[in-house]
Amino acid sequence: MSRPRVVIVGAGFAGYQTARTLSRLTRNKADIVLLNPTDYFLYLPLLPQVAAGVLEPRRVTVSLTGTLPGVRLVLGEADGIDLEARTVHYTGPEGDGGTLSYDRLVLAVGSVNKLLPVPGVAEHAHGFRGLPEALYLRDHVTRQIELAAAADDFKDRSARCTFVVVGAGYTGTEVAAQGQLFTDQLVSRQPLREGLRPRWLLLDIAPRVLPELDERLSSTADRVLRERGVDVRTGTSVEEATSTGVRLSDGEFVDTRTLVWCVGVRPDPLVSGVGRPMERGRLLVDPYLQVPGHPEVFACGDAAAVPDLEKPGEYTAMTAQHAWRQGKVAGHNVAASFGVGTRRAYRHRDLGFVVDLGGMKAAANPLGVPLSGPLAGVVTRGYHLAAMPGNRVRVAADWLLDAVLPRQGVQLGLVRSWSVPLESASPELARVAGGPERRAGGDASPVATGAGAPGGSGTPRASKAQASAVRDPGNRPPPNPDALAPRDPDAPGPPAPGSPAGPAGRHRAGPDPDKPDALNPVRPVEGES
């Protein structure tokens, strides 16, 4: 008798935990296939430290084949699911297509960047959800400081030393906190003329930073940011972005060459094509994470609307904490469908949150006890080491080296601006000139900028690459895939799939109003390893 096949789509927090749990329970009694665009699990909470030069990129990537015994990895992006035929169609990394049949299917595709229709944002901002975006930001920030040190014009120097982060949730707060420390170190080795110091602005339409957390944690983070020199502006949004700066909702124009978009995420649009009931862009499931009418299909993580049994009538939030736990429950329930163990409903209890503010500063409330300062920093780093499924020694070593040695402020030049457009539905993959098309979307919601903004729906926007190409048709990457990237690191690239100037692509689902800001998912103080 042949073994049943389980196909897991996505290797984020939910998908990785599902595969790991299922592998342990079935012990080769099932053929487990994991479909994912990359061969690693990305530990998103430490991504800001990659952008700030604290951690090397590979430290936050955990090998799928090296840590998931008995699981077969298939590289590719799912682009179609046929529930009746029980098949998943995907596109491989070199553009070739394929189909996977299944007896059980687990949808754990996660979420994609939320793009709002603020004029100029799609053309001039960059998100912060994938490793390519973090690498690009580190190079870009380093380059701006170096160019500012060589510039003769004071206004130009000031603009290059000004960095604007939109969204004061987890990601935006940590990016601004880590970024200020990083640029201060760069300037300490290469002082700017006239005593100019790098300036970081953190904007959010919400009344306080980290609006989704307890006010004590929010107050701690706000205090640390302001003491460090970050210009925190709550109740403020961006009305327009240009190549030379951003116009704020209070009418001020801020000269800058850097706009980091950390407003939030929305469910991956793949689930909207399944043809089953949805809840604000998420696939509806029962408490056992099964899709009604299709007991062989399970869904978990950001793309699933899971009933919150602790709050009847509500659904669990789109956070890493829930995704990690739901993945474990999904693994148990898939195994139970084969007669291995018993299924269980998803229940949860929050044990606290942690926010890394750089250096030894953090805000945390393990078991509801608010902490700040070095003690919170120790708790936060201890949690991350416990929660990571690999690379613990390497991460700890990088932290130790960062504490005793200066950071290396150099540009690697590996990721260009046009290869990480904000509208990409696949931030884990950098675009390559002449490479295979990547799925992209452009449904932007017509709401104000910042966390806490209500959701909505809108019309597709042109991609950053397309808009730039219209302004300068000759400023495009070479058509030869083996050719070098444009000489200008910020030069635009090829038209994006899904835009009027590019190949047809899949549009995104609408934003989730319950997810105002969480590009970097909520950090649970409970880790399951």
Image: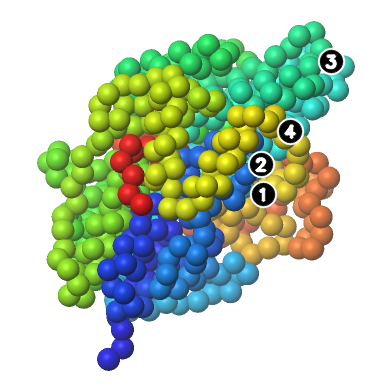
Q: Which residue is mark 1?
A: 419
- Quarter of image, res 436: bottom right
Which one is in front in this view, the residue at disc 1 or the one at disc 4? 4
Image side of residue 412 versus residue 37, left or right: right
Mark 1 closeness class: few <14, some 14–19, many ≥20 residues within 10 Å: many
Residue farthest toward the bottom in the current orientation of the protein:
1
> Residue at the location (40% across, 25% down)?
376
Q: Coloring scheme of the render?
A: rainbow
Which one is in front in this view, the residue at disc 3 or the one at disc 4? 4
Q: Amino acid at mark 2?
A: Tyr
Q: Position of residue 406 (x, y in %)?
A: 70, 29
Mark 2–mark 1 CB contact (< 8 Å):
yes
Task: Return the disc, 4 or 2, that comes first in the chain's sequence.
Answer: 2
Q: CA distance from mark 2 to mark 1?
A: 9 Å
For mark 3, give the secondary structure: loop
Which one is in front in this view, the residue at disc 4 or the one at disc 2? 4
In the image, 507 versus 151, the foreground residue is 151
Mark 3 closeness class: few <14, some 14–19, many ≥20 residues within 10 Å: few
